[in-house]
Amino acid sequence: QVKQRQPSVALKDKKIVFLGSGKMAEAMMGGMVNGGAVEATQVTACDPNAGRRTYLKDRFHILTTANNASAAKGADILILAVKPQTMALVFDSIRDTISKDCLVVSIAAGFTLSQIREGLGVKRVVRAMPNTPALINESITSWTFTQEVSPEQRRQAKELLSAFGAEVLLSDERMLDMATALSGSGPAMCQLMFEAMIDAGVHMGFARDVSRKLVLHTVRGAVNLALASGEHPSMLKNDITSPGGTTAAALYQLERGGMRTVFSDAIWAAYRRSRELG
Ligand code: NAD
């Protein structure tokens, strides 16, 4: 289900080209085209995989090509959505055809703004870090940009990145490594927690599908309550912790197991690793 929005004023008539049209690009195209922010004819999907091109053309009625150089020519916004190990190849394929004023938006993990500037010989670069819920238009995407990106291009980037979820503009590129740890690796950390809770339900005697339903709906409800109420999680937790009750017994064991420090250590480890890789 894609949230419908008004056609984007900032993106009106802009030629938007995806270099690499895999899972993340598809999520972004889906949000943009199906959500109504842009016309399908504004979007070109570039990918060497013929099966991907046919699939995306049928699904979104966008333009497709296997030729990076010709696709990049005349692009107003170029989205780099290939794997990090393919970036150098892509730089080589478009360096001579990309317009110097083109807005380049990279979602490739670990590639810095200056690496992209140097690799492509362009100045207007946005670096963004989406996360996997982008696949259902629920990404939280952090982003930052080079100082040459114009105010109009910033509006374009903001509308583009909010087409498949929410976005947060970070004032410093180094914070992207922090976001990589917290929201990039976050979904996997959450899945591990869900798995632990589901397994505990099975251990008590629930069928696995029943336990899964109870856990996932509990998590969804807790997240929606926290978002809707705007309350700090500690307040919502205290509200349901009766003196001498079941929740107090559970929370005691989680604290005893070092849950807060385990999460903190895990997120710091992901942050350090992100900096090592960058
Ligand atoms: P993917 O493998 O699904 O897609 C990559 C696509 O690039 C493929 O369709 C492939 O055919 C195409 N490709 C290969 N060589 C190419 C070339 N020379 N020119 C053009 N296209 C080429 O990968 P993905 O999961 O969509 O990830 C894309 C980028 O998004 C990665 O850099 C990744 O770091 C970043 N990212 C992914 C996630 C995630 O959760 N998947 C989250 C944040 C950022």
Image (tube, rainbow, N blue to C red):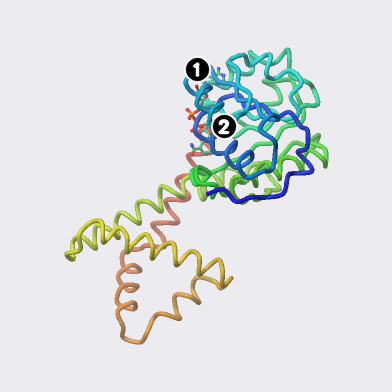
Real-space Cα separation, disc 2 to disc 1, in angstroms: 22 Å
Q: Residue shown at 56%/69% (left/top)?
A: 228
Query: Residue 194: percent from the left, percent from the top?
Result: 34, 56
Please tell me the numbered disc located at residue 85: none
- Please identify the quarter of the rendering in which residue 111 is found: top right
Q: Is residue 148 left or right of residue 143?
A: right
Query: Relative to residue 217, is residue 242 depicted above or below?
Result: below
Judge: label 2 CB < 8 Å from ligand 1: yes
* Residue 140 percent location from the top left of the image: 57, 49
Q: Residue at x 49, y 24 (%)?
A: 52
Residue wearing tag 1: 50
Residue highlighted by disc 2: 108
Which amino acid type is shown beneath numbered disc 1?
Ala
Nearer to us of marks 2 and 1 is 1
- Residue 37, given in percent of the width and then of the height, sits at 69, 43
39 left or right of 179 in image:
right
The image quadrant where one finds the C terminus is top right
Q: Quadrant of residue 113?
A: top right
Tell me: residue 14, above or below residue 267. Answer: above
Q: Earlier in the sequence, mark 2 or mark 1?
A: 1
